[in-house]
Amino acid sequence: MTTSKPSNKPLEALVRKAKPTKKEIEKVIEKTKSKAEEYALDPKKAKRLLDDAVKKTKSYKINRGPLAEVWSYLTTLFRLLRAYIRRDYRDIPWGSIVLVIVAIIYFVSPIDMIPDILPGGLVDDAAVIAFVVAQIKLDLDNFLAWEVERSDDESDSEEVKSEPT
């Protein structure tokens, strides 16, 4: 008598089809906003969240699979929150920074619409990140422009320092 290993194919197919709807995403975001506001008001707490998020990115090959399409946005959200915590960049509406934190909280949480340990469990994380990015696109573009301007300013000051006098 041979025993065969149970197949995960039906579960994988179910999870793959389980991309959350816009309404489900909006519901999750609303539920998480008050918690995100607490983080936005407490830089130490926000830094711990950011550290957890960075640690999670290092523990997975997250830049592949469901998160591949939103990977650059996710890392931009990290940089934006870091600059906000450090008070380097504050030119962002309160609602937008709260949404940034909502996306990061959702990403860090292993138990969400589709638990991260299941096959395809990051599909919902990618959907929430994409939704948040769409909501704050202009603010994100402004932040990216600030980063470029800041790096240009730093490059100019480095050139001045290295010129012989």
Image (tube, rainbow, N blue to C red):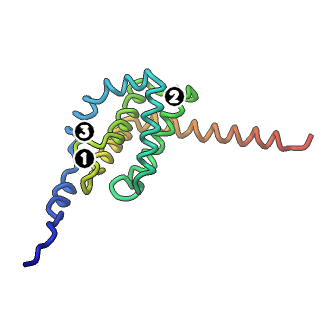
| Element on which disc 1 rests | loop
User: Which residue appears at 20% of the width and 60% of the height?
Assistant: 12
Whether residue 8 is situated above or below residue 73 in the rendered picture: below
**Residue extending furthest left?**
1
Q: Position of residue 92 (x, y in %)?
A: 47, 27
Q: Left or right: 75 with respect to 98?
A: right
* CB contact under 8 Å: marks 3 and 2: no
User: Which residue appears at 22% of the width and 50% of the height?
Assistant: 19
Q: Left or right: 78 with respect to 15?
A: right
User: Which residue appears at 25% of the width and 35% of the height?
Assistant: 28
Q: Left or right: 91 with respect to 12?
A: right
Q: Position of residue 154 (x, y in %)?
A: 70, 39
Is 124 or 121 nearer to us in this picture? 121
The amino acid sitting under disc 1 is Pro
Q: Position of residue 4 (x, y in %)?
A: 13, 72
The residue at which mark 3 appears reads as: 25
Mark seen at residue 85? 2
Between marks 3 and 1, how big is the CA–CA gap?
15 Å
Q: Quadrant of the N terminus?
A: bottom left
Is 116 or 134 nearer to us in this picture? 116
The amino acid sitting under disc 2 is Ile
**Residue extending furthest right?**
165
The residue at which mark 1 appears reads as: 115
Mark seen at residue 127? none
| Element on which disc 3 rests | helix
User: Which residue appears at 14% of the width and 62% of the height?
Assistant: 10
Q: Residues within 10 Å of mark 2 (few under 14, many from 20)?
A: many
